[in-house]
Image: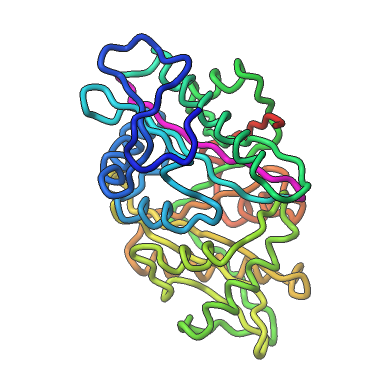
């Protein structure tokens, strides 16, 4: 397996499928971001998935990953000069385990020809290589989240020895439905987000999420990437303060290009979090209800969020009580290294 690759260099694989004109090479950030975004959109639309990144969104994501080198950690497949497949490996320490988190895509017209399998094998090999370079003593594992609508990926992972370890739901609710009255707890107030507060809001959210299943260790790259998200509009966010302390927040996003491709007017409620001293007082419900009213006032039709199916804080029940309904299921697959 090739190491120390530079961008755009052809890679010889030990088990390539017999597809005319097929070759593999390392990822080139300058020339491949737009074709990869196009590939992801085509693949995910075919799978009824909802991750349809714009070129700028994808570039921002790739540029802000700690311990990640696109030229080493990504591989693309081309047929006659067109990207037909791609894979990537990022890394995240979760609950004391180094998780090599995989993703991959194949255009619908080139599926069932072995391309996805060989891309998976390459990414596993790259993960083993990276594990050998890791200086810590933590155990390592490979993880891949897929939607239940990605039937080809589900079949591939299960035949390659991956086991299911967790489930999650994408939830959606219409903004045309009545929004419950959920008042803010006494002593708290919601203030407009200003740049000077970005770090404190982020750190409060990071602290709150440490109680979640396998919360990842966040890095400075995560902070920079989050606040560099194209089209970010923090006037949609709802952040509750108790004096000088952030009690909780809901970070709302609208992805205009994704909405256009899907034919929807949707907002995403991201990073819904409440710090421990302010939990069980109705703060999350108040911030969500306030978010829904704001999003409706902006002319949006629906709101979506993601939730761990086994969240111990009762988040799933809370979201259902606020009108959200399960829309799609995600499955976490894992294999030890």
Residue at image coords 60%, 40%: 130
Q: Is residue 100 above or below residue 299?
A: above
Decide whether the magenta segment is chiefly helix, strand or loop: strand
User: Seen in the image, is 72 located left or right of residue 130?
Assistant: left
Q: Is residue 295 above or below residue 111?
A: below
User: Seen in the image, is 202 located left or right of residue 11?
Assistant: right
Residue at image coords 63%, 68%: 205
Residue 32 appears in the picture as rendered: yes
Question: What is the x, y in percent for residue 42?
Answer: 31, 33
User: Seen in the image, is 139 located left or right of residue 243?
Assistant: right
Question: What is the x, y in percent for residue 27?
Answer: 36, 40
Magenta span includes 96: yes
Question: What is the x, y in percent for residue 247?
Answer: 67, 77
Q: Which residues are magenta?
A: 95-109
Q: Residue furthest top?
A: 18
Q: Is residue 9 above or below residue 251?
A: above
- The image quadrant that residue 255 belongs to is bottom left
Magenta span includes 268: no
Question: What is the x, y in percent for residue 41?
Answer: 33, 38
**Considering depth in this image, is 20 or 296 the residue closer to the camera?**
20
- The image quadrant that residue 144 belongs to is top right
């Amino acid at each position: 397996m090739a190491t120390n690759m530079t961008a755009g260099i052809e890679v010889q694989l030990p088990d390539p499928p017999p597809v005319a004109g097929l070759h593999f090479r390392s990822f080139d950030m300058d020339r491949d971001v737009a074709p990869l975004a196009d590939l992801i959109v085509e693949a995910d639309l075919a799978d009824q998935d909802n991750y349809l990144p714009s070129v700028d969104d994808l570039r921002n994501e790739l540029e802000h990953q700690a311990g990640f080198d696109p030229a080493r950690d990504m591989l693309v497949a081309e047929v006659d000069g067109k990207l037909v497949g791609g894979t990537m490996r990022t890394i995240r320490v979760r609950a004391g385990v180094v998780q090599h988190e995989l993703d991959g895509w194949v255009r619908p017209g080139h599926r069932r020809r072995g391309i996805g399998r060989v891309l998976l094998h390459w990414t596993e090999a790259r993960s083993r290589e990276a594990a050998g370079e890791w200086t810590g003593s933590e155990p390592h594992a490979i993880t891949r989240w897929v939607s239940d609508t990605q039937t080809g990926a589900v079949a591939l992972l299960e035949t390659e020895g991956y086991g299911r370890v967790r489930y999650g739901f994408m939830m959606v609710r219409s903004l045309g439905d009545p929004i419950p009255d959920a008042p803010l707890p006494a002593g708290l107030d919601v203030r407009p987000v200003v740049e000077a507060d970005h770090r404190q809001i982020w750190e409060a959210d990071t602290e709150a999420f440490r109680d979640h299943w396998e919360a990842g260790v966040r890095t400075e790259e995560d902070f920079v990437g989050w606040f560099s998200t194209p089209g970010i509009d923090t006037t949609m966010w709802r952040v509750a303060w108790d004096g000088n302390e952030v009690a909780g927040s809901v970070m709302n996003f609208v992805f205009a290009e994704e909405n256009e491709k899907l034919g929807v007017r949707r907002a995403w409620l991201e990073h819904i979090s409440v710090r421990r001293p302010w939990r069980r007082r109705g703060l999350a419900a108040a911030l969500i209800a306030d978010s829904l009213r704001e999003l409706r006032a902006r002319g949006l039709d629906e709101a979506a969020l993601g939730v761990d199916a086994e969240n111990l804080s009762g988040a799933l029940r809370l979201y259902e009580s606020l009108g959200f309904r399960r829309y799609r299921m995600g499955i976490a697959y894992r294999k030890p290294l």
